[in-house]
Image: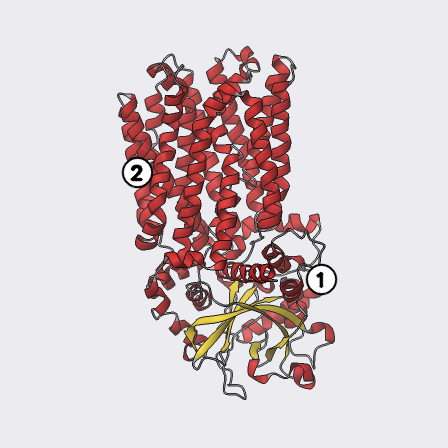
Amino acid sequence: MMRGAVFVAIAAAIGNFLQGWDNATIAGSVLYIKREFHLETRPTIEGLIVATSLIGATVITTFSGPVADWLGRRPMLIISSVLYFLSGLVMFWAPNVYILLLARLLDGFGIGLAVTLVPVYISETAPPEIRGLLNTLPQFTGSAGMFLSYCMVFMMSLQDSPSWRMMLGVLSIPSLFYFALALFYLPESPRWLVSKGRMKEAKKVLQGLRGREDVSGEMALLLEGLDVGGDTAIEEYVISPDNDLAGHQDHEVEKDRIKLYGAEEGQSWIAKPVAGQSTLGMVSRQGSLANRSMLMDPMVTLFGSVHEKLPEMGMGSMRSMLFSNFGSMFNVNPENQVKHEHWNEENMERDEENAGSDHSGNESDDDMRSPLIRHDSNAEKDNNGEQLGSVGIGGGWQLAYRKDENNAGGLKRIYLHQEGGAAASRRGSVISIAGTEGPADGDLVHAAALVSHSVLRADDVTTHQSIGLATDKKPQAAAQGPGWKDLFEPGVKHALVVGVGLQVLQQFSGINGVLYYTPQILEQAGVGVLLSNLGLTSESASLLISGLTTLLMLPSIGVAMRLMDVAGRRWLLLSTLPVLLVTLIMLVLGNVLDLGSVPHAVISTVSVIVYFCTFVMGFGPIPNILCSEIFPTRVRGLCIAICALTFWICDIIVTYSLPVMLNSIGLAGVFSIYAVVCSIAWVFTYLKVPETKGMPLEVITEFFAVGAKQNAESENN
């Protein structure tokens, strides 16, 4: 079911493989470039050779967002592969330092496009359930590229006269492979196609990515995502069989009812407004039920309320989910896919068999994928003549519609989320009681809903089939295009604070500066002592340690990939940042205290390795993942460009200043600064960064709009 999205993400992430390859080759080859151009006493020029690619990335990033919104994501990835190829050729030829600087500039152009747009491309093509996993692939492929490159540079360093030109020029070979994949395999982002009104192309791409024909629900979601800055409200519903609420006076609001359908054909369910029943609704009015800091952003607790009421999960059950996620991505058996539009006798028999297996406590894949709200295209209209459908959009969320009372012919869209959100409670409360006389009190399902104006009209969604037809039409919102004024919408501004803040803190934690200069840092730390018995030079020894360090990163990133959609982004950040802080403190102590050459080398090497491995589990991939998730479709390119520009400017500052800082305040002073930044980053994450796991992109942006509205109201009060 998800194979298409997985393979597309892997192919796109090769752009980050090339970035990692380049990072390692320049880190290793700069040792030999210094000798040829006599840069030992000119650290400024040395820093410029490395920083030129960052300058190129910064320049191209300034234009990448708007141009990607104009040309598309795929053409920009193709251009990135061409720039990688050309830069490799020029670096292989470079007769002097000026040509080398030009080549590094071209290389920076390719890096800037890949680093900026690959996470966006993956987020826009991945299903919500595994979006975090797939968006961790760029970190994995980048580290894999670094490892293979360090291996190559290490082997070349054993030669009598190592060629730095060969080290840098090899980049052209994998660039050709990336070019072929981008040109002949990668599809355009379906969200970008929808934003341009190319609905049929978007539908075809989405069908290939999801491996099914019926994608009308997700197409409708993509259409709704074109809206920016809508007036979103949180409402609460109770979901029950059609005949259950008739006797409850509190819920007799016929004009607001949404018709739902159970597992058996002909059995209807309804949702009606209630007050004060859902966790999300209570948090939206009162804040989290838990004891939270008064300084915490209300938006964080609002996002957290979606995840707080999940069924209790011990470490055992977390592990079972953890190690089943990756394999399930390749489960494409069409017999296991639930078809929304057909509920025939075979499906009914399968549901009965699944219900019978409930007593054993086993969860079937079908039940896990069964939507809470199922649309029956043959349903009759209700007493008010309204036919209201609803469609699953992934991550336990449903997209439903109702008529807008205040706008003739208008619609309200409803993003609906069941309290608890888990398939187990869902099946127990809705599906398992299909066909019974009536539900018990515990079978009422409480759900929270984000309600806003729809881009569709009432005539567009009278049936499930008509939803599909409506998504074939070019929406009016697509003609508007992105605008700078959209950046000043409260929800967008709120998201920019989170995105820009994370990028600044990530870079000033020093990771890219340390990566670029890892061989030299380890050489200064005396790492050659550890490998002197092997007969290796200090340069070769430091390259070997760097290669081993990147090798150890790979399983660490693998763990992060499994946890990203289980434990979540916020949890990973809050768990890994303290480890970074401890390793940095150890580096400071190891360089301040006189422990002898061998203990000093051991402490420095182990601390750097643990630092890198921990970084790639959290603070490495998550800022880019979150930045690719939290902005509306119409302004995503602009906002990503702002965040990426922040990333590269801070990267230039860190990378260019590191040689000077090492000469002036030493390793202890450098890592002391990084430790302070990591402490600030933990506080910022705790107070400002929400949890977005498993949520459709369009729902995330709605939450930011609601959170910004709440912040404004609290400030006014």
Residue drawn at point x = 65 percent, y = 17 percent: 593
Q: Secondary structure at mark 1?
A: helix
| Residue 532 horizontal/vertical position (percent) | 54, 11
Q: Which mark is residue 401?
A: none
Task: Tell me the residue that label 2 is attached to.
Answer: 83
Q: Residue type at mark 2: give it.
A: Leu
Question: Quadrant of the image for the C terminus?
Answer: bottom right
| Residue 433 horizontal/vertical position (percent) | 67, 74
Spatial CA span between label 1 and label 2: 57 Å
Q: Quadrant of residue 213?
A: bottom left
Residue 238 visible? The answer is: yes
Q: Marks 1 and 2: CB-CB under 8 Å? A: no
| Residue 253 horizontal/vertical position (percent) | 61, 83
Query: Does residue 589 appear left or right of residue 457 in this picture?
Result: right
Residue drawn at point x = 57 percent, y = 80 percent: 257
Residue 630 visible? The answer is: no
Residue drawn at point x = 68 percent, y = 51 percent: 293
Q: Secondary structure at mark 2?
A: helix
Task: Please say if 392 is above or below 89.
Answer: below
Task: Please say if 513 is above or below 335.
Answer: above
Q: Which of the pair 610/140 is nearer the observer?
A: 610
Q: Residue type at mark 1: give it.
A: Ser
- Most distant residue in the front direction: 716
Residue drawn at point x = 69 percent, y = 86 percent: 247
Q: Earlier in the sequence, mark 1 or mark 2?
A: 2
Q: Which of the pair 690/714 is nearer the observer?
A: 714
Query: Does residue 318 appear left or right of residue 87 in this picture?
Result: right
Task: Tell me the residue that label 1 is attached to.
Answer: 360
